[in-house]
């Protein structure tokens, strides 16, 4: 139906004997989204992808495609295609033949196959390589052929299982941009699986962070980076300062915490934690500002620089905050600011919106 999401996972659980790979996963994916499933090894990413592709059946729950229950439908009847990490190109077939493969399976006529082949090869800039075999292509070109083959039958959903894993770092960055641009231009729905947080941040419209078969947080890259709901997300994505303290309560939008005698104000993207237990807040390194006088920011403490590391475009400062029992912070500043901060105590300030009080 028109109003149904392209994909809906409804209470999907998958058990392998004693192991619960997916635990009651519920998720909607809209047409045209680039969704990345991100998480450490064993969190259930590949299982989700295999269930979407029809290669695996859930123990409980349903998979809907445009509102239609496809839970028990085999892969070839789902209009879903997959790109594997090792590309799985047929080595004895040329680029053209590789691309034609899925179209022939669909029973498409010769003329129509030729038209689709030309169209997709020109779109992915592969026309010059049509008669080559996979072994005669670079890693990046092979990746494009794998994409061309998967996109040729015009699937509603494309599943990508760590498809850039085999590429070296430099090529990987380039192919990431390319993949993103292909997704934009085709307006296809991409479901991308990776354990690489940088890759996820670069390419996705939306990231679903998985932990032990459950959704830890679901949001845009910016939301997850600046407003992590849990310690798991704060630590898994990027670098951060973790401040441990006690919950004092709330004042309007602000969550008030005591940090070794200093009062700090943050927000709680994952909900206000329960009172009584120690709480943790996350502040990204580049969100700390430096001032000669006490700043008007929600949070201000005095600290001393105990270390400086030049990192090229920026500098990392190690700081000790005496008023918070010598707690340590780390900050990224531009190189000029870094040079100008001396040995004298300096004011460090950050906003309420820069500090996420974590759910757990
Ligand atoms: N066929 C299987 N039989 C038994 N256990 C399985 C099977 N497939 C997956 N598992 C288990 O289910 C859990 C989730 O596995 P899954 O492959 O989905 O994780 P993943 O997040 O994709 O990990 P990775 O990044 O290492 O590929 C793991 O504990 C794994 O050992």
Image (cartoon, helix red, strand yellow):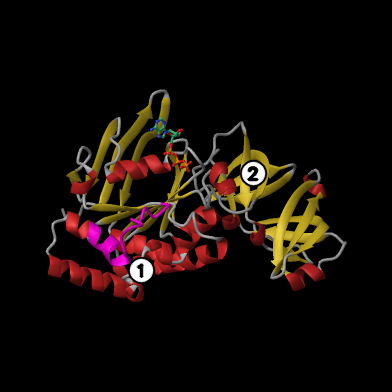
How many numbered discs?
2
Q: Would you name the residue on which mark 1 appears?
A: 132
Q: Position of residue 258 (x, y in %)?
A: 68, 42
Residue 359 lies in the magenta-colored region = no
Which quadrant is home to the C terminus?
A: top right
Residue range in magenta is 85-101
Q: Residue at x 32, y 75 (%)?
A: 127
In what element is the residue under mark 2? strand
Q: Position of residue 333 (x, y in %)?
A: 71, 66
Relative vertical location of residue 95 with respect to residue 196 in this rendering, above or below:
below
Q: Residue furthest right?
A: 343
Q: Front-most of 218 and 55?
A: 55
Q: Is residue 210 visible?
A: yes
Q: Residue at x 43, y 55 (%)?
A: 163
Q: Earlier in the sequence, mark 2 or mark 1?
A: 1
Q: Is residue 292 left or right of residue 174?
A: right
Q: Position of residue 261 (x, y in %)?
A: 75, 43
Q: Would you name the residue on which mark 2 appears?
A: 257
In what element is the residue under mark 1? loop
Q: Quadrant of residue 27?
A: top left
Q: Front-most of 321 and 25?
A: 25
The Cα–Cα distance between marks 2 and 1, rounded to whole angstroms, is: 63 Å
């Amino acid at each position: 139906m028109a109003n149904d999401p392209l994909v809906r996972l409804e209470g999907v659980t998958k058990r392998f004997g004693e192991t619960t790979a997916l635990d009651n996963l519920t998720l909607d994916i809209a047409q045209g989204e680039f969704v990345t499933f991100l998480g450490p090894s064993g969190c259930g990413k590949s299982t989700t992808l295999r269930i979407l592709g029809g290669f695996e059946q859930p123990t409980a729950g349903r998979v809907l495609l445009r509102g239609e229950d496809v839970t028990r439908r085999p892969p070839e009847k789902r209009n879903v295609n997959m790109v594997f990490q090792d590309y799985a190109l047929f080595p004895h077939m040329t680029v053209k033949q590789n691309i034609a493969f899925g179209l022939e399976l669909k029973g498409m006529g010769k003329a129509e196959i030729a038209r689709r082949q030309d169209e997709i090869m020109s779109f992915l800039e592969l026309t010059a390589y049509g008669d080559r075999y996979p072994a005669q292509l670079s890693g990046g070109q092979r990746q494009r052929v794998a994409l061309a083959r998967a996109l040729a039958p015009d699937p509603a959903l494309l599943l990508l299982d760590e498809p850039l894993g085999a590429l070296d770092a430099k090529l990987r960055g380039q192919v990431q941009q390319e993949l993103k641009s292909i997704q934009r231009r085709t307006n296809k729905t991409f479901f991308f699986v990776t354990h690489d947080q940088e890759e996820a941040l670069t390419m996705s419209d939306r990231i679903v962070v998985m932990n032990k078969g459950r959704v830890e947080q679901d949001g845009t890259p910016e939301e997850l980076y600046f407003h992590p709901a849990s310690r798991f997300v704060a630590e898994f994505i990027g670098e951060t300062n973790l401040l441990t303290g006690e919950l004092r309560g709330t004042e309007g939008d602000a969550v008030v915490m005591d940090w070794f005698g200093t009062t700090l104000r943050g927000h709680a993207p994952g909900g206000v934690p329960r009172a009584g237990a120690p709480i943790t807040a996350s502040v990204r390194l580049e969100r700390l500002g430096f001032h000669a006088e006490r700043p008007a920011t929600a949070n201000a403490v005095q600290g001393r620089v105990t270390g400086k590391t030049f990192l090229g475009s920026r500098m990392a400062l190690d700081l000790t905050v005496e008023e918070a029992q010598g707690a340590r912070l780390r900050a990224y500043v531009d190189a000029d600011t870094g040079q100008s901060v001396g040995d004298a105590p300096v004011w460090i300030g950050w906003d309420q919106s820069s500090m996420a009080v974590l759910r757990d």
